[in-house]
Amino acid sequence: MIARFGLLAALALILSWLESLVPAFFAVPGMKLGLTNLVVLVALYRMGDRAAVGVNLLRILLAALLFGNGYSLAYSLAGGLLSGAAMILLKRWGKFSMTAVSVAGGLMHNVGQVLTAMLLLDTWQLAGYLPVLWIGGMAAGLVIGLLGAELTRRLPPELFD
């Protein structure tokens, strides 16, 4: 279990690094595909809540240490924790597909980041940026959810035992 956890955390970190090399989509600051969420989503559905949270937290901390700063840590942590909590709750409820869970995660990640920006910059006016981010969050969540569902279907269950 520890080896699989480490592999997923390493994969999430690599995807995070690769994504940091790609310019923002549509020239909108902060809009990214969220490739690391693919790993978190697979961990959530194959290894459970604790593993998904652990992989996400470890990736966020290592990414901030290796190629980020305090601000990137704050934004990633807020977005990751809110996104993770939403995905765990919706998955536990059992009425949503993995794709819907992923879309909710993408939307909540945006909320966490905008709330953090509002606190750090001391302005509520950034809330007007949420609709723009939500369009990207829904699209990214949809793509990541579809990929996650396909990966989860194709990866052998014994890989996660």
Image: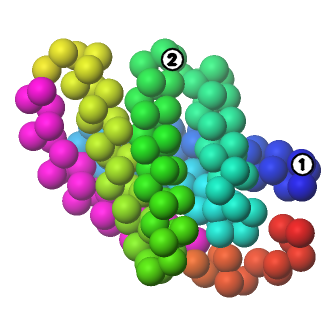
Judging depth in this view, the residue of 102 and 139 nearest the camera is: 102
Most frequent secondary structure within the magenta stretch: helix
In depth, the one of 27 and 50 nearer the eye is 50
Q: Is residue 65 above or below residue 80?
A: above
Q: Tell me what residue is drawn at x 22 percent, y 25 percent.
A: 118
Direction front: furthest residue: 93
**What residue is shown at x 44% (from left), y 80% (from top)?**
95
Bounds of the magenta span? Answer: 124-148
Which residue is pictured at 69% across the width and 43% down the height?
54
Q: Which mark is residue 2?
A: 1
Q: Is residue 99 above or below residue 154?
A: above
Judged from the image, the secondary structure of the residue bearing numbered disc 1 is helix
Q: How many marks?
A: 2
Which label was assigned to residue 69?
Answer: 2
Marks 2 and 1, the one that precedes in the sequence: 1
Q: Name the image colouring.
A: rainbow
Residue 101 point in image, percent of width and height = 45, 68
Mark 2 residue element:
loop
Residue 131, image x and y in percent?
15, 51
* Quadrant of the drawing holding the N terminus: bottom right
| Residue ID at (45%, 24%) | 74
Task: Kindly identify the amino acid type of the residue bearing the numbered disc 1.
Answer: Ile
Q: Quadrant of residue 23?
A: top left
In reply to whether residue 137 is colored magenta, the answer given is yes
Question: Is-magenta flag for residue 12?
Answer: no
The mark lying in front, picked from 2 and 1, is 1
